Image (cartoon, helix red, strand yellow):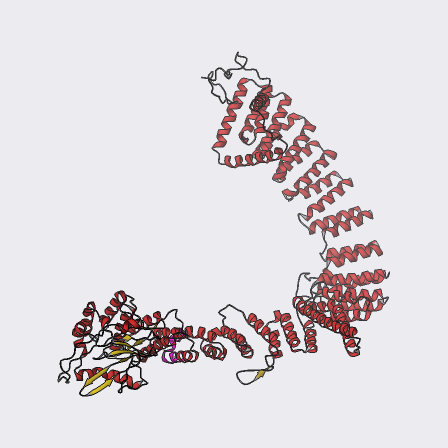
């Protein structure tokens, strides 16, 4: 190969030395639908020969100085100086000959009958003394040269100078250079080292030339400028595009030629990543796994590290398609450089059944805290995938698993490490470890794992996962054993060991189901050992098993910390003591109570309830004196106690003597079983400690009242009033004043009490006290005093009670001093009340004046009240005033009422509050319509009936009993008849007033 290449490279020199001016030509043949390019030199007496077997070769003979030079044709383009190329192809029994782009095809038979073309013979065969380069002869030769070859069908012509092993394909390329190419050829000769003439030449051929002509030009270009990246890329792209969609298995030779062309390009352009990408992409289309892999390796070695990603982008799909150990090795190398793609590597390992290495890769991911999954997977998801891999392929993965550093680690150690790393997923991990041993066939070890799991998990969810899986596994094993037992019975065989094993398994399963409530309780207690309700549930689970109940109470008291207890810890002690009490062992119950009251509970209330439970236990056993002594011990305190009940820095035992709950039980106990003096001492002690509540005051006062110590009971109320302020004091004053009035004490003392009560009394509570005060004056004092009290009440009560208080005041004044005495009250009420309440008070005032016959005073009151009432918001007010004028007025007063109505309406139109009042009125109207809408008939009526009903409604709304001042029977605003309307409907305002007379 090297010898032939050198021969062709030296050929132009020999031509120049020999004086031969034969041109370089090319020919295009189609072999099996693929182009096969080849390069040759067309010399005089050259011709194509097709032998009987269909093989075509080219024979070129050069005679110079009695020498004969024979040149064969290579199967791929050679680096000839001239750079002209041609393609030779061969096919059995037929040659398809194509010229230029016209697609003319000539069968071999026609080619054999074609005329023989001969070239112009050189004038001299002697070597020239001054040889000229071939390029200088090119234009002249292109115009005058005629190829001197002929095509012959038949057997190969013998040639003694040519070895039999060398085939010589013929061809001519002169037709590839046309007259229009002369300008580009001259540019190339003018600038042999410039790339621009070659690019222009190639662009011209791309637009107007054939594929063969493009190849002819680009081959010359890359030969002339072998370091031009642009020319090589253009040439390679053209050659690879030509083989697109061609089968590399059927056209192996053609693909190999392009591979060789890429190799030529990479000799000088091995640092160009784009050339490598094109080459590697082209190789990936061919079934050359080893050669392609080595080429990828060459690319990685040739390119810098920053360009490797472009190679790996193609290398990874190639590895996936290659599969097998090749893919694993390639991905292993890639994972070393790009560990972020280790997840893809794991998928490849799983596809290739490399489970051990996949587990090792998962372990590397989990041990790397800085790893970030490109698939956004978390550590637990990776752990779960590894666990499933270990479970599903338990028999294929060795245990222990070898590590990269030479050490080993067992599968159980791996899974148990996840229990500490993912404590919130322990249920899944325990189940996974058990499943691993089940797949290995180690059922007893799997059962041990299940037992360990249900006794160590910390959440009910994890327990449910483990327990349910455990139960399902046991059921599955039992069902298998039952089927085997049934099969043995059918065959009449007896296996005592198998039957015993089945009985043991069923008994074990029953015990497992019976243990479930206790196991759930264990989980909750492991979760929080200070959970008192769960300890009580555990006691209830043991039922009548006294020994386990006592053991459970003992364990609970030892495990629960009083300061961390969840729930009522004292109830645990109480139930413990009641358990012994129910069993008749009161002595041990007292011992438990004695220990219980010394426990440092979280709050004082728990300790107080513990003392109370102890006293109640003594009461149940009719030890009344012992109960009193217990409560006396519980409430024992220094003479002057400065202890703050809410001081958390002190223990509950130091603060319990100020517990009102404890004292309340103590005083009730003493009141039930002891004398009055003892009870009074207890109450006095409560007041001394200043822990009395309003209920304590009331109970103490009621006790003294029941014993007929009335004055002392009043003193208790007064002591309670000193302790409490409003609003608590209001209830005490209410009880105190009621009982004082019922006792009929002196009026002066009662007045002093009421004055004390209403003094500094909040307006919210003043109404009740003033009413009681006024009732007292009406009953036992003077009416004038009562009126003064009611007058004070109208100023002292709250705003929401003031209207009611004025009405009550008016009622009392009218009943005691007559209606005329209420005028001043009404006036003060109208001045003091808000607009809405003042308008209502005005209506009542006017009605009172009307009853007295003071029409003018009543009309003036109506006029005064009109300023508070918007006609569109308060139509009821104006309706009442209209009725008043109809009954007691005349036309002038009615017109005045209408004028005032319009004036007030105009005033509200310009008022800022008009919009709000209108909105309120509209909402009220809509609400009223919704309430009455369901009661109305929704059927449509005729037009005449509707008009008649509308007329009746207008007549009903018309003023009744009013006599107009005009002489007409219908007034001055009588509407026109049907004949006078001229077909037009007039709209009449019912409130319209004719003011022509005033003008």
Residue 498, by quadrant, is bottom right
Mark yes or no: residue 639 visible. no
| Along the viewing direction, whichever of 793 and 840 lies nearer the viewer | 840
Quadrant housing residue 945: top right
Magenta span contains residue 748: no
Q: On the picture, is 145 further left or further right than 497? A: left
Q: Is residue 305 magenta?
A: yes
Count of numbered badges drawn on the protein: 0
Image quarter where the N terminus lies is: bottom left
Q: Residue furthest top?
A: 967
Please say if 630 is above or below 928. below
Q: Return the x and y of residue 139 as percentages of the image width and height.
A: 17, 73
Where residue 116 sits, quadrant-wise, is bottom left
Judge by depth and name the residue closer to the eye, 918 or 259. 259
Q: Would you say residue 910 is visible in this rendering?
A: yes
**237 or 792, nearer to the observer:** 237
Q: Does the magenta stretch mainly form a helix, a strand or a loop?
A: helix
Residue segment shown in magenta: 296-309
Question: Quadrant of the image for the C terminus?
Answer: top left
> Residue 302: percent from the left, percent from the top?
36, 80
Q: Position of residue 738 (x, y in %)?
A: 74, 42
Of the pair 395 and 430, the residue shown nearer to us:
395
Left/right placement of residue 957 relative to residue 127 reads: right
Residue 270 spot, x, y in % from top left:
33, 78
């Amino acid at each position: 190969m090297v010898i032939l290449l050198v021969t062709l490279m030296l050929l132009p020199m020999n031509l120049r030395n020999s004086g031969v001016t034969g041109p370089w030509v090319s020919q295009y043949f189609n072999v099996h639908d693929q182009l096969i390019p080849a390069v040759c030199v067309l010399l005089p007496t050259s011709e194509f020969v097709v032998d009987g077997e269909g093989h075509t070769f080219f024979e070129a003979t050069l005679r110079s100085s009695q020498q004969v030079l024979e040149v064969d044709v290579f199967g791929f383009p050679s680096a000839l100086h001239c750079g002209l190329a041609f393609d030779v192809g061969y096919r059995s029994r037929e040659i398809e000959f194509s010229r230029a782009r016209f697609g003319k095809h000539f069968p071999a038979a026609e080619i054999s009958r074609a005329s023989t073309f001969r070239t112009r013979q050189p004038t001299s065969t002697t070597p020239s003394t001054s040889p000229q380069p071939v390029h200088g002869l090119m234009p002249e030769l292109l115009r005058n040269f005629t190829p001197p070859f002929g095509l012959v069908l038949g057997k190969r012509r013998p040639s003694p100078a040519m070895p039999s092993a060398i085939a010589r394909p013929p061809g001519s390329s002169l037709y590839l250079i046309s007259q229009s190419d002369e300008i580009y050829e001259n540019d190339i000769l003018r600038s042999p080292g410039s790339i621009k003439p070659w690019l222009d030449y190639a662009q011209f051929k791309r637009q107007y030339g054939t594929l063969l002509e493009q190849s002819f030009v680009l081959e010359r270009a890359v030969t002339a400028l072998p370091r031009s990246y642009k020319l090589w890329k253009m040439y390679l792209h053209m050659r690879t595009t030509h083989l697109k969609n061609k089968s590399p298995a059927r056209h192996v030779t053609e693909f190999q030629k392009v591979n060789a062309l890429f190799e030529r390009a990479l000799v000088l352009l091995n640092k160009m990543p784009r050339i490598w990408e094109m080459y590697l992409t082209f190789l990936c289309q061919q079934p050359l796994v080893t050669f392609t892999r080595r080429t990828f390796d060459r690319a990685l070695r040739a390119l810098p590290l920053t360009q490797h990603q472009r190679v790996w982008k193609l290398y990874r799909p190639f590895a996936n398609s290659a599969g097998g150990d090749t893919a694993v090795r390639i991905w292993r190398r890639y994972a070393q450089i790009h560990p972020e793609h280790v997840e893809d590597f794991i998928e490849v390992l799983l596809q290739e059944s490399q489970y051990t290495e996949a587990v090792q890769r998962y372990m590397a991911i989990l041990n790397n805290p800085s790893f970030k999954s490109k698939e956004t997977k978390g550590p637990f998801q990776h752990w779960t995938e590894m666990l499933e891999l270990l479970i599903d392929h338990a028999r294929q993965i060795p245990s222990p698993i070898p590590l990269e550093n030479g050490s080993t680690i067992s599968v159980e150690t791996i899974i148990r490490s996840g229990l500490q790393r993912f404590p919130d997923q322990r249920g899944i991990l325990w189940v996974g470890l058990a499943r691993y041993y089940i797949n290995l066939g180690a059922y007893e070890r799997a059962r041990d794992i299940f037992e360990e799991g249900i006794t160590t998990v910390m959440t009910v969810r994890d327990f449910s996962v483990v327990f349910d899986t455990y139960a399902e596994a046991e059921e599955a094993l039992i069902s298998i054993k039952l089927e085997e037992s049934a099969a043995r019975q059918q065959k009449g065989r007896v296996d005592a060991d198998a039957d015993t094993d089945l009985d043991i398994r069923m008994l074990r399963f029953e015990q497992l189901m019976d243990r479930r409530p206790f196991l759930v309780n264990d989980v909750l207690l492991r979760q929080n050992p200070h959970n008192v309700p769960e300890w009580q549930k555990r006691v209830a689970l043991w039922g009548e098993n006294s020994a386990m109940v006592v053991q459970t109470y003992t364990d609970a008291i030892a495990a629960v910390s009083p300061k961390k207890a969840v729930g009522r810890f004292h109830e645990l002690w109480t139930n413990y003591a009641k358990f012994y009490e129910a069993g008749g062992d009161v002595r041990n119950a007292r011992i438990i109570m004695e220990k219980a009251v010394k426990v440092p509970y979280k709050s004082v209330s728990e300790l107080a309830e513990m003392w109370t439970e102890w006293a109640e236990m003594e009461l149940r056993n009719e030890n009344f004196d012992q109960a009193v002594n217990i409560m006396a011990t519980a409430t024992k305190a220094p003479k002057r106690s400065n202890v703050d009940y809410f001081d958390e820095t002190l223990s509950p035992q130091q603060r319990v003597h100020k517990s009102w709950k404890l004292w309340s039980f103590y005083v009730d106990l003493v009141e039930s079983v002891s004398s009055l003096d003892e009870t009074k001492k207890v109450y006095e002690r409560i007041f001394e400690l200043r822990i009395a509540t309003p209920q304590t005051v009331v109970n103490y006062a009621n006790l003294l009242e029941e014993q007929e110590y009335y004055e002392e009971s009043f003193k208790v109320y007064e002591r309670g009033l000193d302790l409490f302020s409003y609003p608590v004091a209001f209830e005490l004053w209410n009880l105190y004043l009621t009982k004082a009035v019922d006792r009929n004490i002196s009026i002066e003392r009662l007045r002093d009490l009421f004055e004390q009560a209403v003094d500094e009394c909040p307006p919210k509570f003043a109404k009740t006290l003033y009413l009681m005060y006024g009732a007292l004056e009406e009953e036992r004092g003077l009416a004038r005093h009562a009126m003064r009290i009611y007058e004070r009440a109208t100023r002292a009560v709250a705003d929401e009670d003031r209207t009611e208080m004025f009405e009550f005041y008016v009622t009392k004044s009218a009943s005691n001093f007559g209606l005329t005495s209420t005028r001043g009250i009404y006036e003060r009420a109208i001045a003091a009340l808000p607009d809405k309440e003042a308008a209502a008070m005005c209506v009542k005032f006017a009605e009172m004046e009307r009853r007295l016959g003071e029409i003018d005073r009543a009309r003036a009151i109506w006029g005064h009240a009109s300023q508070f009432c918007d006609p569109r918001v308060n139509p009821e007010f104006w309706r009442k005033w209209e009725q008043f004028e109809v009954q007691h007025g005349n036309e002038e007063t009615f017109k005045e009422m209408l004028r005032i109505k319009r004036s007030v309406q105009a005033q509200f139109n310009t008022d800022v509050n008009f919009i709000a009042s209108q909105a309120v009125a509209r909402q009220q109207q809509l609400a009223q319509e919704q309430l009455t809408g369901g009661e109305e008939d929704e059927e449509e009526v005729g037009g005449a009936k509707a008009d008649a009903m509308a007329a009746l409604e207008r007549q009903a709304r018309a003023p009744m009993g009013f006599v107009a001042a005009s002489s007409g029977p219908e007034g001055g605003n009588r509407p026109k008849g049907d004949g006078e309307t001229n077909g037009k409907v007039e709209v009449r305002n019912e409130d319209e007033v004719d003011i022509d007379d005033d003008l």
